[in-house]
Image: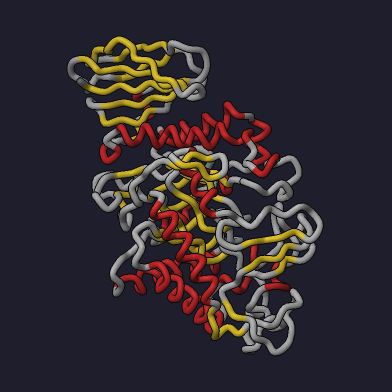
Amino acid sequence: MVFLGAWPVLAVAPATGPLRVSTTNPRYFADGSGKAILLVGSHTWGNLQDYTYDKLPSPPAMDFDVYLAFLRGHHHNFFRLWVWESSLNPNAKQGTITYDPMPYQRPGPGLAGDGKPKFDLTLFNQAYFDRMRSRVVAARDNGIYASIMLFNGFSIEGKGNVGGDPWQGHPFNPENNVNGVDAGSDKAIHTLSNPTITARQEAYIRRVIDTVNDLDNVLYEISNEDSGGPANTAWQTHMIQFIKSCEATKSKQHPVGMTQQYPQGDEPALLASPADWISPGTKVYTADGRKVVLNDTDHSYFWIGLKQDGVAAQRAWVWENFTRGNQCLFMDPYLDASHDPGRNDPAGGTPDPYWDALREAMGRTRTCAERMNLAAAIPHGEFASTGFCLADPGKEYLVYLPQGGEVTVDLSAAAGKLDTEWLHPTERTTIRAEPVAGGGRRTLKAPFVGDAVVYLRSK
C-alpha cells in the first residue's frame, strides 16, 4: 500500500471493456470479461480543465493522482470528465470564472473577450487532448471508467446556481474567433439550426474519438443539462448517432449517454433517444431495462435538498436506487469551497467529510453488487414490505430497510434455506444470522437500530 495525500491506494486491475449493455440484464453494462458491473462514483467540475474565480477562493489545479486515489478510497469506479466550452463566464454568481485549457489554439490576431488572443477554430490545441487522454489512461489503470462530457449547457447560457453570461467567452461567438464563425445566439449553438456550427462540433467530436478510441474505459455524454426542448433534443440525438457512426469504423465502440435537460427536463426524450445510458431527474427511479440508468445527484437531488434532508436520507437515496436497478453518481464539490455558500468545507485541502456518508454508500453498493450475480438481479419491490428489493428470485435477495426494524420478504420461489447476512450501512459491519427457510413469506428483524440491508442467498 502506498499513500497519495490522505487516500490509500491499493493494487487494482485496470478497467476492461469497452463496456457493452448487458444482453442478459440491460440495466447494467458488462465489462471486457462479459460480467455485469455496477458503476458508481464522484465527479467534480475541474477534473479536466482548471478554473478560477476572480474574487472568491478558487480550488487548486487538480492533482489527478490524488483525485483517483480519493475515488478508489471510496471504492468508486466511475466519473464524468467535465468539459467547459467557454473560456470566460463574466459576472457569474461565483464571480467571473475563467477556464483553461481550451480545445482550440489561440494565435489571434486580435483579442477575445477574456483578453487573450482569439481562437482559430481550424486549429486544435493538442495540449487539451493530451490532457484528456492522459487522464482517461490514468483512470483506466486505476480500474475506473470515465465518461467524457462533450458539451455543456452551462457554457452557452447563464442559469441555475452559476448564472453569468458564458456566451461572451464562447469560441463560437464571432467576437472570439478569427474564422468569422457566428452561432447567432447562445442557445442556438446546441441545435441543428446552423450547419456551419454543427460541422465544427462534429469535427471536435471526431478529434475526441481519435484521441481515446483505443481505450477500454471510455463512455461519452453529449451535454450537461442543456435547456431542452425539441430542437435541443434533435441536436443531441444527431450527436449520439454521429458518435456511433464514427466509431462503427473504428477498432472500438463505446457507450453514449444523454443526461437530464434543464430547465426543460424531458425524461421521455431520454428514453426515446438512441443513447445507451441516461441520467434522469427523478430522485428514485425504477430501471425497467430500456436504458442503463446512472442516477446523478447533479440532476435528481440538488445539494440544497441533500443537506436539508441530512446524511440518513443521502444514504437511503443510494440504497433505494440500487435496489431499484440504478447506479448512483454524486456531484462532488471536492476541493471547491466557493461554488455555493454552505455547500462545502474542504478544510486543510481535503474533501469535506460531511459528504462521506454519500460517497461511502455508493462504494458499499458496489461491494454488494460484486458479490451478486448482477446479470440476473432485477428490481422486485413487490417481494419486500419496504418496497426495496433487488433479486434473482429463488437464488438471492438484497433488501433495504430505510427505517430498520422488520421487513417481510416473499421467498416463495426459493427452495430450502437461504444464508442470511445483515449489513450495517453506517458502521461497515456484517452480521450473520440464522438461515431463513424459503417457500413463503418471512418476517425478518434487523439486529441493530437504524436503516439496514439484508442479503439472502440460497445455499
Q: Quadrant of the C terminus?
A: top left
The answer to whether residue 452 shows anywhere in this view is yes
Could you tell me residue 158's position as x and y percent? 71, 62
Which of 388/51 is in front? 51
Could you tell me residue 136's position as x and y percent? 44, 60
Residue at screen point 70% across, 41% down: 343
Residue 99 location, quadrant: bottom right
Residue at screen point 43% across, 25% down: 400
Which of 364/319 is in front? 364
Which of 163/387 is in front? 163
- Compared to 7, does 228 lie above or below? below
The answer to whether residue 288 shows anywhere in this view is no
Number of callouts: 0
Residue at screen point 28% across, 70% down: 251
Q: Residue furthest front?
A: 2
Q: Residue furthest right?
A: 55
- Compared to 191, does 158 lie above or below? above
- Compared to 299, does 230 lie above or below? below
Quick check: 323 left or right of 125? left
Could you tell me residue 126's position as x and y percent? 52, 76
Could you tell me residue 344's position as x and y percent? 69, 41
Residue 87 location, quadrant: bottom right
Residue 163 location, quadrant: bottom right
Quick check: 15 left or right of 150? left
The scheme the figure's colours follow is secondary structure
Q: Quadrant of the N terminus?
A: top left
Which of 103/27 is in front? 103
